[in-house]
Image (spheres, rainbow, N blue to C red):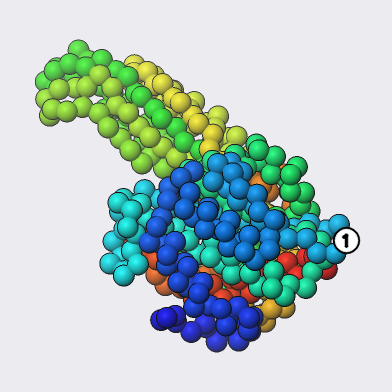
């Protein structure tokens, strides 16, 4: 199996994990070859459940449809830990040309959830074989992260009532960050994502006689421009926000002023107060701007998922596990929050915990048709979960 050697900063991949690595690299590539969309992770879910059962886990399937929880209990100590991996793929046509490229038309593991699932399975096996811990370990294999629905659905089905946990941890690989190094952000670590669908309504007519129309194209153009002032003029300069108009559609012919123009936009924020400000200011500005041209705007502002907010104590703990396992150089100092979003945010609204990052090295970005998970991360990341579980469940 052709796996690039782990970087020199990782001399201490757990020997048992290192010995079984070929099997897990093959498993990751098998998952990559058979990607499944949100809530359709049937094959993946069955594969996960079967392996966990083989290794002695008490396995609960069908949590939010395709979700799986594997539980391992040792001793009588009451501590309980949850670790989460996501399983779903994206509606993207793969363009990697890899031997193990997707066999599902238009579906692709372009976010590395095949890798996250494999990492947690590799840790699961090692913890079942020889894990030194006392308490309850719940390994949560979540469906439907990409549509922001899986975590919420698992919570709705009583995840934390059925599998009591003192804290929950999760990770994401990150291209563009040095391979195998860990990033921890205390506090807001990933953005809240909301969206708005807008129709700017005017009165159509002949392109040669604009005075007889209300031109929604000109009004929409001003709306787009004015929206750029929300972050620059309304948000505190020391806070962050994003307003992106990503879609604009209206009209057909060059000589016909249309009745309406449709806009779609997304907003991102890291703090609840900034999120509320965007929720209030964006629709108000769109309506007022349209009105100034005698046009009207219908704004449907939809709240997506909240920011990922890591608790300081758990983040400190998670970073210390990486330092202890791999040395201080394994942790990136001053790692910055990411403006992407993660539905792990819902778990962190219910339980203390930390969502952390592991660098995937220089390679195509997440959600790119050229992306492929970096198999060199399986060893270090699985070792990390083992150390974290053993340190948490003392
Ligand atoms: Zn993704
Ligand atoms: Zn992802």
Compared with 105, 320 (above or below) is below
Q: Position of residue 328 (x, y in %)?
A: 67, 80
**Relative to the observer, which residue lies in front, 87 or 281?**
87
Q: In which image quadrant can residue 132 be found?
A: bottom right
Q: Position of residue 157 (x, y in %)?
A: 65, 38
Q: In which image quadrant can residue 216 be found?
A: top left
Instruction: Say whether residue 56 is left or right of residue 48.
Output: right
Q: Position of residue 38 (x, y in %)?
A: 47, 45
Residue at position x 60%, y 34% from top? 276
Q: Which residue matches tag 1?
A: 76
**SS class, disc 1:** loop
Residue at position x 39%, y 21% from top? 297
Residue at position x 13%, y 18% from top? 206
Badge 1: few (under 14), some or many (20 or more) residues near its Cα, within 10 Å? few
**Relative to the observer, which residue lies in front, 106 or 365?**
106
Compared with 74, 108 (above or below) is above
**Relative to the observer, which residue lies in front, 113 or 24?**
24
Can residue 213 be seen by looking at this rendering?
yes
Compared with 390, 10 (above or below) is below
**Relative to the observer, which residue lies in front, 364 or 89?**
89
Q: Position of residue 333 (x, y in %)?
A: 63, 72
């Amino acid at each position: 199996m052709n796996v690039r050697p782990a970087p020199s900063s990782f001399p201490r991949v757990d020997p048992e994990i290192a010995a079984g690595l070929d099997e897990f690299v093959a498993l990751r590539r098998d998952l990559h070859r058979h990607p499944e969309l949100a809530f359709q992770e049937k094959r993946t879910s069955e594969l996960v459940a079967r392996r966990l059962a083989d290794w002695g886990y008490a396995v609960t399937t069908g949590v939010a449809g395709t979700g799986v929880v594997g539980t391992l209990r040792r001793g009588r100590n009451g501590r309980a830990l949850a670790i989460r991996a996501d399983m779903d793929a994206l509606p993207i046509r793969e363009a990697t040309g890899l031997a193990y490229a997707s066999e599902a038309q238009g579906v692709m593991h372009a976010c590395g959830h095949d890798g996250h699932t494999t990492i947690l399975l590799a840790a699961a096996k090692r913890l079942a074989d020889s894990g030194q811990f006392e308490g309850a370990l719940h390994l949560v294999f979540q469906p439907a992260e990409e549509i922001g629905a899986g975590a919420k659905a698992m919570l709705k089905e009583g995840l934390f009532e059925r599998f009591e946990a003192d804290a929950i941890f999760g990770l994401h690989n990150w291209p563009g960050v040095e391979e195998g190094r860990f990033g921890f952000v205390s506090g807001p670590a990933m953005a809240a994502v909301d969206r708005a669908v807008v129709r700017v309504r005017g009165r159509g007519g002949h392109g040669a006689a604009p005075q007889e129309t209300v031109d929604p194209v000109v009004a929409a153009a001003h709306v787009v421009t004015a929206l750029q002032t929300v972050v620059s003029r309304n948000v505190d300069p020391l806070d962050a926000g994003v307003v992106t108009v990503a879609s604009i559609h209206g009209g057909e012919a060059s000589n016909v002023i249309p009745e309406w123009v449709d806009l779609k936009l997304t907003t991102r924020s890291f703090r609840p107060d900034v999120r509320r400000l965007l929720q209030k200011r964006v629709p108000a500005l769109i309506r007022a701007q349209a009105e100034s041209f005698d046009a009207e705007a219908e704004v449907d502002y939809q709240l997506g998922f909240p920011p990922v907010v890591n608790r300081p104590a758990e983040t400190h703990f998670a970073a210390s596990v990486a330092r202890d396992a791999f040395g201080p150089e394994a942790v990136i100092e001053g790692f910055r929050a990411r403006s992407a979003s993660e539905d792990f945010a819902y778990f962190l609204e219910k339980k203390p915990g930390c969502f952390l990052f592991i660098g995937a090295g220089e390679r195509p970005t997440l959600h790119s048709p050229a992306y492929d998970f970096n198999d060199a991360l399986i060893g270090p990341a699985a070792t990390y979960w083992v150390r974290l579980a053993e340190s948490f469940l003392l």
